[in-house]
Image: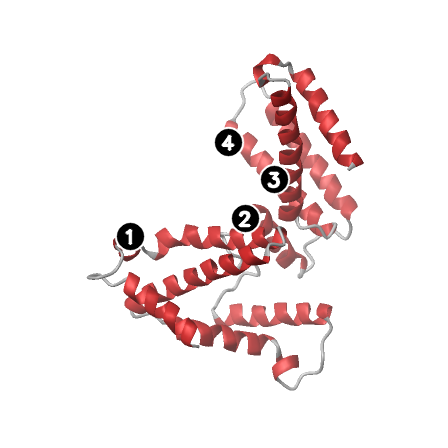
Amino acid sequence: MDNLQKLLDIMKKLRDPNDGCAWDVEQTFETIAPYTIEEAYEVAEAIDNKDMDALKDELGDLMFQAVFHARMAEEEGHFNFADVIDAISDKMIRRHPHVFGDENYRNAEEQTIAWEEQKAKERAAKKQKSILDGVTVGLPALTRAVKLQKRAARVGFDWPNTSGVIDKLNEEMAELSEELIAIKQDHEKIEEEFGDMMFVYANLARHLKIDPEQALKKANNKFTRRFNKIEQEIEKKQSSFDQYSLEELEEFWTKAKKEEKSE
């Protein structure tokens, strides 16, 4: 544990009001939180890229975020890093009685059910009464939508199959269309209807056992690859975007799409 203690000592030194780093000393939980989220995404990116060297570095950056928050909490007398370790260790043991206790072996599906039941008990202990309590507000919106829907589904508030979801999606799209063709458009109402439609899209993804964040990430990457090929085509012709009509740019797009499919 010497290397972990070294990191804790570095953090303590950085936060020293007399001899530390001015930037680190000025930080708060609120100012550091965006960096914590960013580092988690960079871990995910390294995994997507199958870059183990980058993953090692990004995991270190993410761990440093935990150390940073724990140090600030210790300075305010709330808890320290050791308390964080104890808390997660106790939680993992509590949520895996089939591994650390007397319960029988569970398969993955049984463990998922038991995990959710244990989390429900923990929410009750925290006096969180709603089934939806505890679904983190700070999650990406599509991810949070799926988690909210999963919670509701556990008590039967769900369509039995995808046909009901698609009917609802068509209903929401029609409502959005009505707002778009209104004589006097209400931007807030359009945004609301668009949000309703996206919520149902997330629900459809859940029914199809698709992670909507991952699906959209792949679509973003695909768009980037194909758009880069359009840029390369234009550069090859020593021209610029404003020299082409939308129809001509669409032709470049179709070409890039065909090339990608043939690779």
Near mark 4 (Cα within 10 A), the count class, few <14, some 14-19 or many ≥20, is few
> Which residue in the protein does label 4 denote?
188
Is disc 3 placed on a helix, strand or loop? helix
> Which residue in the protein does label 1 denote?
23
Verify CB contact (< 8 Å) between mark 2 and mark 1: no
In whole angstroms, how far apart are the C-alphas of marks 2 and 4?
A: 21 Å
Q: Nearer the viewer, residue 224 or 158?
A: 224
Is disc 2 placed on a helix, strand or loop? loop
In whole angstroms, how far apart are the C-alphas of marks 4 and 3?
A: 12 Å
Verify CB contact (< 8 Å) between mark 4 and mark 1: no
User: Which of pointers 4 and 1 lies earlier in the amino acid sequence?
Assistant: 1
* Mark whose residue sits in front, 4 or 1: 1
Quadrant into which the C terminus falls? top right
In whole angstroms, how far apart are the C-alphas of marks 4 and 1?
A: 39 Å
Verify CB contact (< 8 Å) between mark 2 and mark 4: no
Is disc 1 placed on a helix, strand or loop? helix
Location of residue 251 with respect to 2 vertically, above or below: above
Location of residue 189 with respect to 70 vertically, above or below: above
> Which residue in the protein does label 3 denote?
196
Label drawn at residue 254: none
- Disc 3 marks a residue whose amino acid type is Asp
Residue at position x 67%, y 48% from top? Answer: 203
Q: Is residue 83 visible?
A: no
> Which residue in the protein does label 2 denote?
140
Residue at position x 72%, y 68% from top? Answer: 109
- Disc 4 marks a residue whose amino acid type is Glu
- Disc 2 marks a residue whose amino acid type is Pro
Left or right: 248 in relation to 2: right
Quadrant into which the N terminus falls? bottom left
* Mark whose residue sits in front, 2 or 3: 2
